[in-house]
């Protein structure tokens, strides 16, 4: 019985199970996965709060492993970062997004934002600028605008961050601070560098309506963002109550299951068709 329970526990906590298996094949599985075409990208709509219209997409990596099944990005991204595989993986993501984009451009308006999550060690690598330039060249011309999403931790650890951020802006790419409020306190960096979007972590959004005093921290963050002229993206919006609270407080963008889950290209086609006829 004990053994069965243990087995069940291992199976249930699938992400630790995955990490265990991956660790037994050091470094090879992700590269093999790229070669075997096991990765694809799903796109989650970004919604303009004022109109409720989709104005962008965030690219999220998906891995379907032949024996492990669907591996969540929270499991393999951190693994890739630790194993120095995030650059080949992001390189692959760029290829997949460029390929999908030629299909996506038929259904999304010009100017649609394409958000990409960039890991800190890629940002500061020697190949970063070439990788980005090559990707932009591979994308359909003049249709998408670009947003790079980085976490607060990136700023704290990088001495030459300012130079890299300037270069990104020179390419016409916007910068979003991802998971805002969860990293090391980085308020000082909001004054030091120029950013375009503040993505407010799902944790804050989930607290809306749960407390008697409505989310004082979230309130303060929104006030701060307004003063700094930053757009705000509320992540993980799941209920109408959350959406209307956020709209009232002046959030500029929202993302979450309420508006659309991450979707494959073919699911997106259906999504935009039903929205058009609605
Ligand atoms: P993230 O960048 O904060 O992405 C948002 C995550 O929240 C996504 O999880 C998305 O599916 C999920 N989400 C969106 N709306 C809702 C909602 O309403 N409710 C709930 N409960 N969840 C929602 P996902 O796709 O599992 O990705 C997890 C994290 O993995 C991402 O967090 C990002 O940090 C990382 N990631 C994913 N793809 C990539 C990639 O290509 N490169 C890098 N460097 N990181 C990636
Ligand atoms: Ca993100
Ligand atoms: Ca986030
Ligand atoms: Ca996250």
Image (cartoon, grey):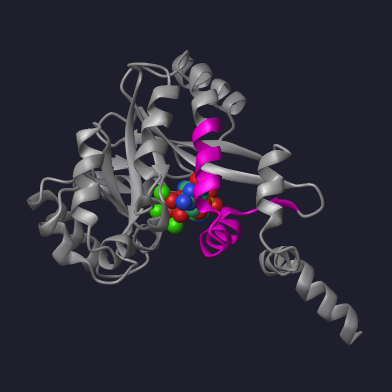
Q: Quadrant of residue 13?
A: bottom right
Q: Is residue 20 magenta?
A: no
Locate residue 125, reporting x and y percent.
38, 52
* Relative to 81, 120 lies left or right: left
Counting from the top left corner in percent of width and height, residue 56 is at 37, 31
Q: Residue at x 39, y 63 (%)?
A: 203
Q: Is residue 162 visible?
A: yes
Side (left or right) of 158 relative to 46 = left
Is residue 214 visible in the rendered image? The answer is no
Q: Residue furthest front?
A: 126
Indicate whether 121 appears above or below 217: above
**Which residue is the extreme one toward the bottom?**
2
Instruction: Give me the residue at 45% from left, 23% from top.
Output: 138
Q: Magenta stretch mostly in which secondary structure?
A: helix
Image point (68%, 69%), residue name: 16
Judging depth in this view, the residue of 267 and 237 nearest the camera is 267
Quadrant of the rendered image containing residue 136: top left
> Which of 148/90 is in front?
90
Q: Which residues are magenta?
A: 69-96
Q: Identify which residue is drawn at 30% across, 61% down.
A: 152
Q: Residue furthest right?
A: 1
Q: Quadrant of the N terminus?
A: bottom right
Can residue 94 be found in the magenta stretch?
yes
């Amino acid at each position: 019985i004990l053994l069965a329970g243990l087995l069940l526990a291992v199976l249930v906590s699938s992400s630790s199970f995955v990490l265990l298996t991956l660790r037994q094949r050091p470094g090879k599985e992700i590269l093999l996965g790229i070669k075997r075409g096991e990765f694809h990208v799903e796109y989650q709509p970004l919604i303009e709060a004022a109109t409720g219209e989709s104005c962008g997409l965030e690219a999220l990596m998906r891995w379907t492993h032949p024996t492990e099944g669907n591996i969540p990005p929270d499991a393999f991204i951190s693994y890739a970062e630790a194993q120095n595989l995030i650059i080949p993986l992001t390189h692959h993501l760029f290829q997949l997004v460029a390929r999908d984009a030629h299909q996506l451009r038929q259904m999304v308006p010009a100017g649609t934002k394409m958000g990409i999550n960039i890991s800190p060690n890629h940002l500061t690598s020697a190949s970063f600028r070439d990788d980005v330039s090559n990707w932009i060249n591979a994308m359909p011309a003049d249709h998408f605008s670009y947003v790079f999403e980085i976490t607060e931790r990136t700023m704290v650890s990088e001495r030459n961050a300012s130079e890299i951020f300037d270069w990104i802006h020179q390419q016409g790419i916007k910068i979003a601070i991802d998971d805002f409020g969860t990293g090391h306190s980085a308020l000082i960096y909001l004054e030091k560098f120029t950013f375009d979007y503040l993505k407010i972590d799902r944790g804050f959004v989930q607290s809306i309506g749960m407390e008697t005093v409505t989310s004082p921290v979230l309130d303060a963050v929104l006030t701060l963002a307004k003063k700094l002229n930053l757009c705000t993206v509320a992540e993980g919006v799941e209920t109408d109550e959350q959406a209307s609270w956020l709209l009232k407080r002046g959030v500029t963008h929202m993302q979450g299951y309420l508006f659309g889950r991450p979707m494959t290209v073919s699911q997106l086609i259906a999504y935009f068709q039903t929205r058009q006829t609605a």
